[in-house]
Image: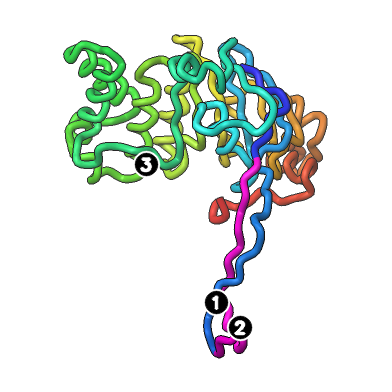
Amino acid sequence: MVCREVSKTFYERDETLAYLPEYRGLVGRWRYLRTRPTPVRAVDKVSFEIRRGEIFGVLGPNGSGKSTLVRLIATLLLPDAGSVTVFGHDVVKERLAVRRLINRVSVEASFFKKLSALENLRYAARLYGYPPREGTEKALDILERLGFNRRKAFGSLENLSRGMQQKVAVARALFTSPVLLLLDEPTTGLDPRSKREVQDFILEVRETHDTTVLLTSHDMSEADRLCDRVAFMDEGRFVAEGTPSELKETYGRPGGDGTVSLEDIFLEVTGKEWPGEEDV
């Protein structure tokens, strides 16, 4: 997968409600003060390449452009400039071919909340052409490997915690063993045990199906464990890229205990503290 000089700009309009004593002959009226749209460069000339079978992590705080980048690759947004190709297929000119190769998990996954986790996966199986019996068996197998017991698999999805719902989203994305798996903060909201189970399953899918993974995350330990290479993103740009060990050697400044963390590297390359859990 290759991105070359990819850019995406959004436009924001500031509308402020203000009390104007005199405005065009009207006295004492509230009016919205509207300004011209302000351009915001969400992704700014980003270039990188992900090799087949690699797990590539994009790390950055909220607003850095990570999710916009994922949506561009997933054909959900059109780039303003540059190009994105997924194993030879252009995301603009060949978006249907790209969609056959990818699957995506985002923080806010959509489901039929009245149905069970199993019923949601069986529905996805039918869309992907699985026979009913085979689809059910595959769904149960995936849920079991993700730590679902049979009772929760058959219960209504709306009665499950957000963390459990996110595990169903991961299961649905992995159902087709995609060539490129886009994981946009897939473990957000999960407890430590559930995070570990999802991470283990991601590694298993990579090993058994040669799946290539693009992962965005706020969890530095997760990125350190899963990713072959990582890139730090800040204000729409990649500010550092390499393997975790290379980045630690190049940018890191050892802490008091002699270790270097990815948080230290983010501070080094951006001059900004890594946001706390309450900020992300």
Amino acid carrying label 1: it is Arg
For residue 278, what is the image quadrant? bottom right
Q: Is residue 203 visible?
A: no
**Real-space CA distance between mark 1 and mark 2, rounded to the nearest whole angstrom:** 9 Å
Residue 3: x, y in percent? 66, 23
| Residue where numbered disc 3 is placed | 163
Image point (58%, 17%), residue name: 90
Residue 70's place in the image compared with 91, above or below, is below
**Residue at the front extreme of this rendering:** 25
* Chain-order first, disc 3 or disc 1: 1
The one nearer the camera, 19 or 67, is 19
Q: Is residue 200 visible?
A: yes
| Mark 1–mark 2 CB contact (< 8 Å) | yes
Which quadrant of the rendered structure holds the N terminus?
Answer: top right
* Chain-order first, disc 1 or disc 2: 2
**Real-space CA distance between mark 3 and mark 1, rounded to the nearest whole angstrom:** 43 Å
| Mark 3–mark 2 CB contact (< 8 Å) | no
Amino acid carrying label 3: it is Gly
Q: Which mark is residue 91?
A: none
Say what secondary structure mark 1 lies in.
strand
Image point (44%, 31%), residue name: 105
| Residue where numbered disc 1 is placed | 31
| Mark 1 nearby-residue class (10 Å; few <14, some 14–19, many ≥20) | few
| Mark 2 nearby-residue class (10 Å; few <14, some 14–19, many ≥20) | few
Residue 161's place in the image compared with 215, above or below, is below
Q: Which mark is residue 23?
A: 2
Residue 18 is a magenta residue? yes
Residue 149: x, y in percent? 24, 30
* Chain-order first, disc 3 or disc 2: 2
Q: Which residues are magenta?
A: 9-27
Tell me if 27 is positioned left or right of 234 in this view: left
Image point (41%, 15%), residue name: 177
